[in-house]
Amino acid sequence: MGITLKGSKPIAQIKKGDKIIVDGKALEVDAHYVLIDHKTTKEMAIELFDPKKEDSDYQIRYFDDQIEDTIEFYEMKTIIYERVDVKRIEW
């Protein structure tokens, strides 16, 4: 079962300062950039943080041509991002 996405604008238009809600938790966008350019597609990353909690870093990763099938959510644990299963992402 995949992640349910609900967007108020195309994901490519998400920018620093925007709010993203992940399973009911409101997070703020710190950056949105190309993580890896694979020539035929781009692997994108959206860096997020919880404005109510110190040291809370998250990432949404996806391929720009297959958003629904490739989107994943990560949480920073110690020094690496670990994938976290989520049900819903809204922006």
Image: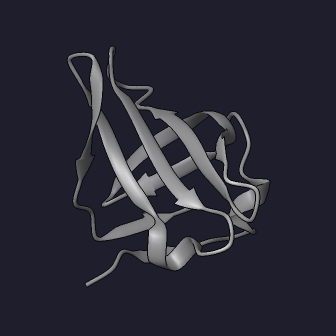
- Compared to residue 81, the image places residue 44 above or below, namely below
In this rendering, the count of numbered labels is: 0
User: Where is 81 relative to 42, above or below?
Assistant: above
Residue at image point 27% right, 16% down: 79
Quadrant placement of the N terminus: bottom left
Above or below, 62 relative to 28: below
Q: Whole-percent x and y of residue 77?
A: 21, 26
Indicate left or right for 21 with 91 as reference.
left
Q: Nearer the viewer, residue 83 or 39?
A: 39
Residue 7, x across and y down, in percent: 62, 71
Q: Which residue is drawn at 74% across and 68% down?
A: 9
Screen quadrant of the C terminus: bottom right
Of residues 41 and 29, the one nearer the viewer is: 41
Quarter of the rendering containing residue 66: bottom right
Which x, y percent locates residue 51? 45, 26
Seen in the image, is 83 located left or right of residue 60?
A: left
The residue at 53%/59% (across/down) is 62
Question: Which residue is at 33% across, 44% downward?
Answer: 74
